[in-house]
């Protein structure tokens, strides 16, 4: 499994609306083949900074299958009006399991 980490910046004045939009998008991720988990983390220190954290079976499940789906289009239609800049996306995998 890999984890997609998307760093997202929004106007802090839009926090409630953005979080609602992401909640509305959750079913599109849940329905995506190869999607195993989904959450949005909010920065405590930097208002308007978020991390979307999504577990995928593979990079292709995210970048090929999901990106070509109606679910991705729905996610972007819901969330992208709030983006200040395009999200910065990384795919990560465990390197050290501490405890």
Image (tube, rainbow, N blue to C red):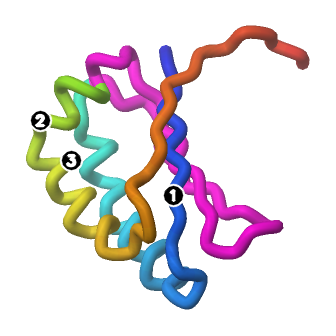
**Mark 1 vs mark 2, CA separation in Å:** 21 Å
Q: Which residue corresponds to mark 3?
A: 72
Query: Which quarter of the figure has residue 33?
Result: top left
Q: Is residue 30 above or below residue 43?
A: above
The reply to whether callout 2 and callout 3 are in contact (CB within 8 Å) is yes
Considering every residue shown, the one lying at the far bottom of the view is 13
Q: Which residue corresponds to mark 2?
A: 68
Q: Secondary structure at mark 1?
A: strand
Q: Residues within 10 Å of mark 3 (few under 14, many from 20)?
A: some
**Mark 1 vs mark 3, CA separation in Å:** 16 Å
What percent of the width, then of the height, locates residue 44? 79, 67
Considering every residue shown, the one lying at the far right of the view is 99
User: Tag 2 or tag 1, which sits nearer the N-term?
Assistant: 1
What percent of the width, then of the height, locates residue 39? 53, 50
What percent of the width, then of the height, locates residue 60? 27, 17
Q: Is residue 61 above or below residue 30?
A: above
Q: For the C terminus, which image quadrant?
A: top right
Q: Which residue corresponds to mark 1?
A: 8
Q: Secondary structure at mark 3?
A: helix
User: Tag 3 or tag 1, which sits nearer the N-term?
Assistant: 1
Magenta-highlighted residues: 34-61
Q: Is residue 55 above or below residue 16?
A: above
Q: Secondary structure at mark 2?
A: loop
Q: Residues within 10 Å of mark 1 (few under 14, many from 20)?
A: many
- In this image, 4 relative to 30: left or right? right
């Amino acid at each position: 499994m890999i984890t997609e980490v998307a760093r997202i910046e929004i106007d802090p004045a839009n926090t409630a609306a953005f979080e609602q939009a992401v909640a509305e998008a959750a079913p599109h991720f849940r329905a995506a083949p190869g999607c195993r988990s989904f959450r949005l983390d909010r920065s405590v220190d930097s208002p308007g900074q978020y991390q979307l954290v999504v577990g995928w079976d593979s990079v292709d499940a995210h970048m090929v299958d999901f990106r070509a789906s109606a679910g991705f289009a729905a996610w972007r239609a819901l969330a992208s009006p709030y983006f200040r800049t395009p999200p910065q996306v990384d795919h990560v995998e465990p390197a050290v399991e501490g405890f």
